[in-house]
Image (tube, helix red, strand yellow):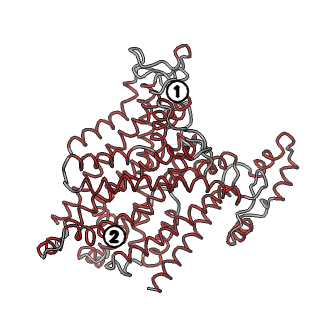
């Protein structure tokens, strides 16, 4: 658990301060030295336009991790809101919200994200929209499920009898109980968002060049697979390490939450 | 039971109607003028405002949202996917061709996944915490983190570029399916191994197993009759997710390996702004996905009678 925590902190630092560590400008074109192998000057080599790959990776962390963070947090807010409406709003609201959730779950989410981002036109805005629209449903299901199980608890009933508005009950009684489970779900969705952003970038529907996003970098690198195979390794490796670290954190958090529930 | 099936079925119909409406609404409100896109694709340089207007009238784009939706959904209900807005040819035959490339890929991928994960999980759980078990866990964790497109590229790099053992691009021979299927299969293997492993371990921990053992039931029989069905339940539940993974994986993998299946069909249609084709793929995916989940719901209840009707 501790080592995982250290790893995640490291990534956060990387995403925030990575650009400061970058030796070069990520968009600095240097044609004479294009496709250079790793050496003392360019630690990870250069790409087809002679841009420093290490600098691009470090700047890319902000895009890949930052956008994934944004997308997963927006999803968290929307999903929790929908779930609480379903749990607190009575039978009809529950039915409407849950069938809406099912409808959005009817598409394999990456396929839906590809279609949405592709149809709206490539760009960061439609990327965020596509991944948010396809990424809020799990939060809604979890918060509704826990919300329904809370409904008959003594303190909720008392709060209702005391005349607290549904909004206040949701804010002061539901949210604190939901938080641990939602954070576990969130780690999974954060990892998914990183994969989604790089997948869309790789298909050319995501963040647009010259922004150094990891999936887009992989798309560029693919063409030069034969001459400089290493160039293709780095961005993918960065994605794998981040997703792995986040998934392991999620597992550790889940264990902690389950243990806590057993104690209660 | 009949009431249960009816209510699950009704829910699937509601969900699919919503999905159709959502798909159509997205494409209807897409930025850009679809009539202009069609006109450009068909008549290229000869496009004038008049041509665009006539195309708009001809393709029913001037009728407004609900009539257009009706025009699309009514033929769809009897299996008519309409015509490509770019080429004017029927969508369905091209879709069938694409499916005929994706199906073998997905099935081979699934098979590879099962062939790796089942033996691995069974052997790994013989000694929980042993080195083999740790390897299985590591494989499952790393496999879940590797994006399909990167794995595919690595496999091309190793087997096609460096070793030259297998072809990478296109779909001319059966050998062309190996690398893409392996890409998909390794992803499936990772998630199946993880789920099977925890399923088997949980089943082993059930309190009734020592009772069987003390009564002298053979270990092999216990494994087959009590541990295996228990471990199968979580596998069935994630099968829907797995199907989604296969479809998503197919999109990425086909693009990487230049395989003319559903994924390439979809991406090409999006790039050409050929919306009838896009709609066809999305709706097909939704129908498949919802149907499979409906079946899973039913199988799940058959496997575990305790679930009963409470979640209907």
Q: Position of residue B294 (x, y in %)?
A: 48, 72
> Badge 2: few (under 14), some or many (20 or more) residues near its Cα, within 10 Å?
many
Numbered disc 2: what chain? Answer: A
Front position among marks 1 and 2: 1
Give left or right: position of B181 versus B130: right
Label 1: chain letter: A
Residue A108 % position (x, y): 51, 58
The residue nearer to you, when weighing A24 against B189, is B189
Circle on res. A147:
2
Q: Is residue A128 above or below residue B14?
A: above
Mark with earlier residue (1, 2): 2
Quadrant the C terminus of chain B occupies: bottom left
Residue B235 seen by the camera: yes
Residue A143 screen position, x and y as percent: 36, 65
Q: Is residue B260 left or right of residue B192?
A: right
Left or right: where B219 falls relative to B180: left
The correct choice, above or below, for B242 with respect to A197 in the image is: below
Q: x, y (%) of residue A209?
A: 56, 32
Q: Residue at x 52, y 66 (%)?
A: A103
Cα–Cα gap, marks 1 and 2: 55 Å
State the mark number for residue A8.
Answer: none
Density class for disc 1 (Cα within 10 Å; few <14, some 14-19, many ≥20) is: few
Q: Are marks 1 and 2 on the same chain?
A: yes
Q: Residue at x 66, y 56 (%)?
A: B27
Instruction: Tell me if A70 is positioned left or right of A48 in this view.
Output: left
Instruction: Kindly tell me whether residue A123 is visible in this rendering.
Output: no
Q: Quadrant of the N terminus of chain B?
A: bottom left
Q: Secondary structure at mark 1?
A: loop
Residue at the image position 31 percent from the left and 43 percent from the top: A245
Pointer 1 residue: A226
Provide the secondary structure element on which disc 2 rests: helix
Q: Quadrant of residue A10?
A: top left
């Amino acid at each position: 658990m501790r080592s995982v925590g250290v790893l995640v902190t490291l990534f956060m630092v990387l995403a925030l301060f990575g650009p400061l560590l970058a030796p070069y400008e990520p968009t600095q074109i240097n044609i004479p030295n294009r496709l250079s192998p790793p050496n003392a000057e360019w630690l990870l080599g250069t790409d087809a336009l002679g841009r420093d790959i290490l600098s691009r990776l470090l700047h890319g962390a902000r895009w890949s991790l930052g956008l994934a963070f944004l997308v997963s947090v927006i999803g968290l807010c929307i999903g929790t809101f929908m779930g609480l409406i379903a749990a607190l709003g009575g039978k009809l609201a529950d039915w409407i919200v849950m069938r809406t959730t099912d409808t959005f779950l009817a598409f394999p989410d990456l396929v839906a994200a590809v279609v949405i981002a592709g149809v709206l036109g490539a760009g960061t805005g439609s990327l965020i929209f596509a991944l948010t629209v396809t990424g809020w449903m799990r939060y809604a299901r979890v918060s509704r499920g826990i919300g329904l199980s809370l409904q008959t608890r003594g303190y909720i009933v008392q709060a209702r009898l005391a005349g607290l508005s549904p909004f206040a009950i949701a804010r002061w009684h539901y949210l604190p109980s939901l938080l641990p489970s939602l954070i576990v779900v969130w780690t999974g969705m954060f990892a998914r968002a990183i994969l989604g952003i790089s997948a869309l970038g790789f298909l050319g529907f995501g963040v647009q060049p010259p922004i150094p996003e990891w999936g887009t970098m992989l798309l560029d690198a693919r063409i030069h697979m034969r001459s400089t195979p290493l160039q293709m390794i780095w961005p993918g490796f960065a994605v794998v390490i981040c997703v792995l670290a986040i998934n392991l954190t999620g597992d550790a958090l889940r264990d902690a939450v389950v243990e806590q529930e057993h104690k209660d | 039971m009949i009431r249960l099936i009816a209510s699950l079925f009704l829910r699937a119909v509601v969900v699919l109607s919503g999905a159709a409406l959502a798909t159509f609404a997205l494409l209807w409100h897409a930025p850009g003028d679809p009539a202009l896109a069609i006109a450009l694709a068909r008549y290229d340089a000869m496009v004038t405002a008049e041509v665009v207007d006539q195309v708009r009238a001809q393709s029913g784009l001037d009728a407004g949202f609900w009539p257009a939706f009706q025009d699309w959904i009514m033929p769809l209900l009897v299996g008519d996917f309409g015509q490509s807005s770019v080429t004017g040819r029927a969508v369905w035959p091209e879709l069938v061709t694409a499916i005929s490339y994706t199906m073998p890929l997905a099935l081979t991928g699934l098979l590879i996944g099962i062939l790796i994960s089942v033996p691995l999980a069974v052997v790994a759980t013989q000694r929980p915490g042993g080195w083999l078990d740790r390897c299985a866990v590591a494989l499952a964790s790393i496999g879940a983190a590797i994006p399909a497109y990167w794995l595919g590229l690595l496999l091309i790099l190793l087997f096609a570029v460096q070793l030259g053992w297998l072809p990478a691009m296109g779909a001319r021979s059966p050998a062309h399916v190996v690398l893409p299927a392996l890409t998909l299969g390794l992803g499936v293997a990772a998630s199946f191994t993880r789920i099977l492993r925890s399923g088997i371990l949980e089943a082993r921990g059930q309190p009734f197993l020592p009772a069987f053992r003390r009564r002298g039931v053979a270990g092999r029989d216990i494994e087959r009759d009590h541990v295996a069905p228990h471990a199968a339940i979580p596998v069935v539940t994630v099968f829907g997710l797995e199907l989604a993974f296969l479809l998503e994986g197919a999109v990425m993998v086909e693009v990487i390996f230049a395989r003319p299946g559903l994924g390439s069909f979809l991406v090409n249609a999006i790039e050409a702004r050929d919306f009838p084709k896009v709609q066809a793929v999305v709706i097909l995916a939704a129908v498949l996905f919802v149907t499979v989940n409906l079946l899973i719901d039913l199988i799940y209840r058959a496997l575990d009678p305790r679930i009963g009707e409470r979640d209907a």
